[in-house]
Every structure is written in structure tokens, then in C-alpha cells.
């Protein structure tokens, strides 16, 4: 009997007892290779003593001080680190405790910015259908995952949704990748014009889509076009890098690879690598200045923002990534893992697409490769893959349901940045067996 309200109410999951590098060991001693970092969180694995010691030292010094009264050293240092590394003019950092909180803060910051600069009519948010931005009501409103939204529709705020950038499914015959990227980006231009540009505050997207599409990068040129469209209409550009950011793609910020900087950039997950809950919004200097020189107060906040232990964890995680050259490992092992997945699944008639960047890779399952017809959702293929993998001691992050009005099953593979070749072999072998078993089961 448990008194914990687990999300899956019909069963109690195993007890995670010990972390051992890329493995989680449960209370019975069974080992699980964490090939998804939970939900793309645990980028350093589960037992980095440098991070643990940094948290302990901070707890010894001071565990908590409310940001309404104090700043603290790890928060200041982590902000310096992030601003130093960030693209564009992102030179202020607003700390929160996770991804949804970060998205909520970014939306409110965009709204307040327009009030401060005398454009109170700007409030609308445009986002994309194939997207997930969090489960709090504001973030859920702008996300496009119907499976998550459906029950709560009466509570959601009004947001406009445009097409995702999903080349595998949506590029037309005879269209080049670049032409496709421009065409689909231009849907944003049309949506802004239809809404009335003077009413639109921000456009939000994930540079590499995570939880709704299994590591789906935008095609080259798409985000540049999006940036131009936002600039043309005075609309703020918000990137949600909660899942794809903080090194996962081989760059500290995913958007670096696209050569595009947003006005607000939301990060979480890999920032604290799961050692502590932490997220942040990186803010363009002119947005900060408008609030500083206007009302002088951002009308939003949370009790645990800038938590000293969480910031100490974030700072230690970022130092480990830098000191151990882990972004190089993400690139090298990411390429090796991708080759291994392609060689294991290249001839599998039920694997439609293998995609992603760095150690952020996705596999899209299809009932028929030629037509790209997805599996019947009643079959719950993604749940079967997860179950088979767990039985074999492997954690991957499968997802399915109805997304953007389409059915689909995806498997996200997002292992810690510290994996080596033997881990890659184990991931591909176990995932191959799990997928085979799920397909025949
Ligand atoms: N944005 C993205 C892109 C995410 O992947 C997630 C979490 N999967 C969130 C926001 C929400 O983050 P959290 O669960 O930490 O609130």
C-alpha cells in the first residue's frame, strides 16, 4: 500500500535506490541503463560527486534565503556563467524551479515588456501544434499536444497554433528542404497578419522538438526565417530549450547551431542535471531595461526561485561539462549512437525515421514505411516498448497519442553525456530486442 499519488495509479513503480554513473539501481538490485536521462534530465548520470559536494557545501553555508530579501552567491555566479555562454543579447537571467515555471515566466515577461513600452494591446501568444511547453495552465495552453490538453480545454487561455517544422511528414514532393522550411515558417507571418500584428506579443517554439516528436530538429533556414518574421512585426521570439538545451545537442544552447538568438530563452532539465530542480529564463537586455526603467518590478515570482542549493548544483554541473569537455563527447558519442541505431534499425520496416542532434535522438515508428501510416493508437506500441525495455534494464522515453491531430509513436533516446562505446552497444542491443518484442507482442 502506498500513500503516494503516483501518476500511474494502477501500479507502483520500482524504488530507485542508488545511482551508479549512467545506471539506476532499484531496491531489489536490478540495474537500469538510463538511456533517456529520465526525461532528458540526467546529463551527468546519477553519481557525480563534484555536484553532490557542491550542494553539500552550499547547504552547510546557507540552505535558503528568499529572493525578495537577498541574492546569493551561487545564483550570481550561475547567471554570470550563462550570460557569458549565451548567444545574442541575452544578458540577464531569471531563475525558476523547472521548465513549466520558466515558460510561464517568459510569457508574463513578454506581456509586461509591451506594457512597459506603451503597447498594451499586445498580448497574443502564437506557438506550434507539435510542441510541449509544460503542464501548468499557461504552458499547456500554448502547447499543441492534444492528449495532454483535451481534458483541460475549458481552463486554457486562448493561443494561436501554427504548423510545426516536420520535414519527414510535411515536405511536399518536388520541394527542397530549404523551400519547405521557408513555406512552413511563412505560416507564422500569415498567422500574425491574421491576428493583427499590433496584438501579438510573442511566438514560442522548441528549436529541437522533444516530448511530442522524439528529437525533431527544424530544417536549416527555418529559425532564421522565423526570427526575420518576428522582427518584421515587432513580436518577441521565445525559444523553449527546456529539453534540447544545456548541451544535449552538442552545443550549450541548441539554437547556436541554427545561428539564431531569441529574445527570451527558457532552460531547465540539463541545467541542474536532476541533482536539484532548477530552470531559468535568459532575457534580452532591452526587455530587462524596459522593466527596470519602467515600473521597476517584474510582477511575477515564486518562493523557491534562485534557491541556493539548486544554483550551486547548476553551477557545478556546468563546470563539470566544461572541465570534462563533455560537449565533445555529446558530438562524438551522439554520432556513434546514431550510426549504431541506423545500422540496427535501418532495415526495420516499422522504423520510419531516425533523427535528432547530438545525444538527443528520436525514432519514429510506422505501421507502413512507404505510406508513413502510424500504428493504431489502441495498440499502445510506445507503452509496450517502454515496458519491454524496462524488463531488460533499459530506460528510453517513448511517447505517442494524438499530436497535432496525428497519431504517432516515437522513442526518445537521450542518454547522459558521459556514455562510452560499451553503453552505446548495450542501449542499441536492448532497444532492438525491446522493439522486436513490442512489435510481435
Ligand atoms: N518545455 C519542454 C520543451 C519540455 O520538454 C518540458 C518537460 N518535458 C517542459 C517545458 C516542462 O518542464 P517541467 O516538467 O520541468 O515543468
Image (tube, helix red, strand yellow):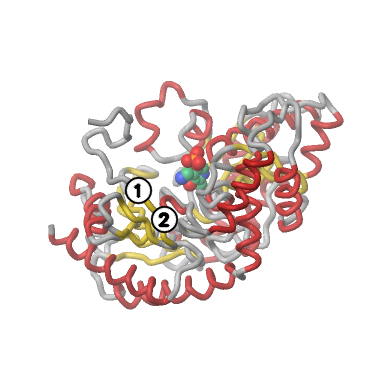
User: How many residues crowd around disc 1 within 10 Å: few (fewer than 14), some, or many (20 or more)?
Assistant: some
Residue found at the very far left of the displayed protein:
441
Q: Which mark is residue 376?
A: none
Q: Residue at x 41, y 60 (%)?
A: 20
How far apart are the alpha carbons under marks 2 and 1?
8 Å
- In the figure, is residue 378 to the left or right of 321? left
Mark 2 element type: strand
Q: Nearer the viewer, residue 385 or 17?
A: 17
**Residue 279, position as x, y percentages in the image:** 59, 43
Q: Nearer the viewer, residue 69 or 151?
A: 69
The answer, for residue 131, to whether it is visible in the render is no
**Residue beneath disc 1:** 16
- Labels 2 & 1 near each other (Cβ < 8 A): yes
**Residue 390, position as x, y percentages in the image:** 26, 55
Q: Nearer the viewer, residue 214 or 190?
A: 214
- In the figure, is residue 275 to the left or right of 262? left
Q: Nearer the viewer, residue 428 or 176?
A: 428
Q: Residue at x 63, y 36 (%)?
A: 63
Mark 1 element type: strand
- In the figure, is residue 249 to the left or right of 340? right
Q: Is mark 1 within 8 Å of ligand 1?
A: no
Q: Residue at x 30, y 48 (%)?
A: 407
Q: Quadrant of the N terminus?
A: top left
Residue found at the very far top of the displayed protein:
154
Q: Is mark 2 within 8 Å of ligand 1?
A: no
Residue 189 position by quadrant: top right
Residue found at the very far front of the displayed protein:
60
Q: Residue at x 58, y 45 (%)?
A: 188
**Residue beneath disc 2:** 19
Amino acid at each position: 500500500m502506498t500513500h503516494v499519488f503516483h501518476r500511474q495509479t494502477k501500479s507502483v513503480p520500482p524504488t530507485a535506490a542508488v545511482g551508479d554513473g549512467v545506471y539506476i539501481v532499484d531496491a531489489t538490485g536490478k540495474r537500469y541503463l538510463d538511456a533517456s536521462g529520465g526525461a532528458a534530465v540526467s546529463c551527468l548520470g546519477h553519481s557525480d560527486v563534484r555536484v553532490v559536494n557542491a550542494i553539500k557545501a552550499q547547504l552547510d553555508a546557507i540552505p535558503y534565503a528568499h529572493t525578495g530579501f537577498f541574492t546569493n552567491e551561487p545564483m550570481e555566479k550561475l547567471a554570470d556563467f550563462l550570460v557569458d555562454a549565451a548567444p545574442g543579447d541575452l544578458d540577464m537571467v531569471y531563475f525558476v524551479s523547472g521548465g513549466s515555471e520558466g515558460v510561464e515566466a517568459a510569457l508574463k515577461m513578454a506581456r509586461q515588456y509591451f506594457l512597459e513600452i506603451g503597447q498594451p494591446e499586445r498580448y497574443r501568444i502564437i506557438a506550434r501544434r507539435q510542441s510541449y511547453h509544460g503542464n501548468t495552465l499557461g504552458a499547456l495552453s500554448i502547447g499543441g499536444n492534444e492528449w495532454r490538453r483535451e481534458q483541460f480545454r475549458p481552463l486554457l487561455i486562448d493561443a494561436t497554433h501554427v504548423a510545426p517544422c516536420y520535414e519527414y511528414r510535411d515536405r511536399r514532393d518536388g520541394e527542397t528542404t530549404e523551400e519547405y522550411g521557408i513555406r512552413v515558417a511563412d505560416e507564422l507571418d500569415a498567422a500574425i497578419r491574421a491576428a493583427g500584428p499590433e496584438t501579438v506579443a510573442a511566438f514560442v517554439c522548441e528549436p529541437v522538438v522533444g516530448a511530442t516528436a522524439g528529437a525533431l530538429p527544424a530544417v536549416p533556414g527555418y529559425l532564421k526565417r522565423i526570427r526575420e518574421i518576428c522582427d518584421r512585426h515587432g513580436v518577441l521570439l521565445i525559444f523553449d530549450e527546456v529539453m534540447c538545451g544545456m548541451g544535449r545537442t552538442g552545443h550549450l544552447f541548441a539554437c547556436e547551431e541554427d545561428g539564431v538568438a531569441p529574445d527570451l530563452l527558457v532552460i531547465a532539465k540539463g541545467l541542474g542535471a536532476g541533482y536539484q530542480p532548477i530552470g531559468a529564463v535568459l532575457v534580452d537586455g532591452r526587455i530587462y531595461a524596459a522593466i527596470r526603467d519602467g515600473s521597476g518590478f517584474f510582477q511575477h515570482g515564486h518562493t523557491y526561485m534562485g534557491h541556493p542549493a539548486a544554483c550551486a548544483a547548476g553551477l557545478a554541473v556546468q563546470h563539470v561539462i566544461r572541465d570534462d569537455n563533455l560537449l565533445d563527447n555529446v558530438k562524438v558519442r551522439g554520432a556513434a549512437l546514431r550510426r549504431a541505431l541506423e545500422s540496427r534499425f535501418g532495415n526495420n520496416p516499422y522504423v520510419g525515421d531516425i533523427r535528432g542532434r547530438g545525444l538527443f535522438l528520436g525514432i519514429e515508428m510506422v505501421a507502413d514505411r512507404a505510406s508513413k501510416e502510424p500504428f493504431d493508437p489502441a495498440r499502445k506500441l510506445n507503452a509496450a516498448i517502454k515496458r519491454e525495455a524496462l524488463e531488460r534494464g533499459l530506460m528510453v522515453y517513448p511517447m505517442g497519442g494524438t499530436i497535432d491531430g496525428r497519431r504517432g509513436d516515437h522513442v526518445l533516446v537521450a542518454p547522459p553525456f558521459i556514455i562510452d562505446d560499451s553503453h552505446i552497444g548495450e542501449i542499441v542491443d536492448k532497444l532492438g530486442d525491446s522493439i522486436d518484442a513490442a512489435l510481435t507482442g
